[in-house]
Image: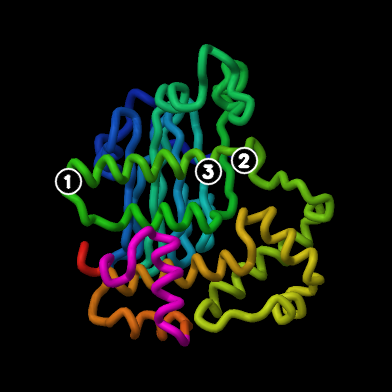
Amino acid sequence: MRSISSSMPLLSNARNTPKSASRDFLDLYEGIGVMRVTMGDDETARPIDVQPEHIHLFFSMEGDVAFQFGPMYMRPLPQGQSFFIYNPKDALRAQVRMPAGHRMVGIRLSFSRMHTLFMRDGQDAQELPFLNQKDMQRPIYDQRGVDAAMQILLEGLFHERLSPNAQRVAHLGQILELLGLYFHTSEPNVVACPFLKDEETVRKIREAKSIILDRWQSPPTIAQLSAQTGLNAYRLKVGFKEVYGNTVYGFVMDTRLNHARRMLDAGGKSVNEVAFDIGYTNPSHFIAAFKKKFGTTPRKYKVSE
C-alpha cells in the first residue's frame, strides 16, 4: 500500500474519540465492526468518525461518494471503489455525501484484530507491511477498485434472512472473506501483465468496466468494447482478468445475477420476469446460471426470504 503524505484534518487525539464513533458501526465480533449506509431522501450528508489504531475500509456500492474532511479537504470515492484509512494516532471526522438511495459499506478493524488475523508466530506480515513494528506508525490512505467477487460479498451484507445470531455469524464470515480478497496483495495496482504497467492501458480497462456496468442488460461484445476503449481484444481480455480477477464475460454474468438477486429481494416480479429484465431470452438458462452462482434456484431463493 502507498502512503499519502497530504495531511488530513484532525478531530482529536485517541483519548478524545467521540462516543458517536461506536454508533456508526455494528460490532460483529471483538475488534470487527460493520456499517451499512443507505442514504435517506432527506439526507445530504452523514458524519462518520474514524478512530485511531483502527483500520477502516469504505466501499461505494451505488453512486459516487465524497468524504469531506474539514473545510479544505475532500476525497471523492466513485462507485465501485474502496477507500482505506489507517491513522495510528489521531481520530478523524468526515462528512460523507452521496445521493439519496445510494449505498455504502464501512468495515472497521482494531489493529490488534488485524494482527491476530494476518500475522502468525510473530512473523512479519509480508503482504501487509503496515502491520510490522517499523511501519505501524505511518498513516495510510489508499483507494482501489472492487472486483466482482468482492461486490457479491458486499451485497450479502445488506441481506437479513436468518435469525439475529445466525445472521451475525454469516455477516462475519462474509467480512472475513472480503478482507482475504482485499489484502491478498500488498500493492493494489501491481499486476502481472507487462503492458498493464502503462497507466493509460489500466485506465482503458477501467473504462471498459464502466461501460459494462452502464449497459449490463445488453452489454457490448468484446469487439465493440475493444473499439470503444481503443484496446485490442487480447489486451482487453487479459488485462481485464488481471485487474479485476474475472473475465469480461464472467463480470457481465456476475453483474446480471447480482441485479437479479436484488430484484428477487425487492419482490413483485416472477422468476421469468426477472430473467427477461436482466437480459435472458430463455428463463431456464437464467435459472441454471443463478443456481450455479448462488447454490439455489431463483424460486427457492424467493421462498427462503
Query: What element does badge 1 sit on?
Result: helix
- From what the image shows, is residue 155 above or below residue 167? below
Q: Type of residue at label 2?
A: Ser
Q: What range of the chain is rendered magenta?
A: 281-301
Q: Residues within 10 Å of mark 1 (few under 14, many from 20)?
A: few
Assign a secondary structure to mark 3: helix
Label located before the other in sequence (1 or 2): 2
At x 52% / y 51%, what residue is drawn?
A: 82
Classify 10 Å Cα crowding around label 3: few (below 14), some (14-19), many (20 and above): some
- Camera sees residue 50: yes
Estimate the spatial distance between the alpha carbons at disc 2 and disc 3, rounded to whole Å: 28 Å
Write down the residue under mark 1: 164
Query: Foreground mark, 2 or 3?
Result: 3
Q: Which of 37 and 161 lies nearest the eye of the viewer?
A: 161
- Residue 276, image x, y percentages: 41, 85
Q: Amino acid at mark 3?
A: Leu
Q: For the view shown, which residue lies furthest in the top direction?
A: 122
The residue beneath circle 3 is 181
Q: Residue furthest left?
A: 163
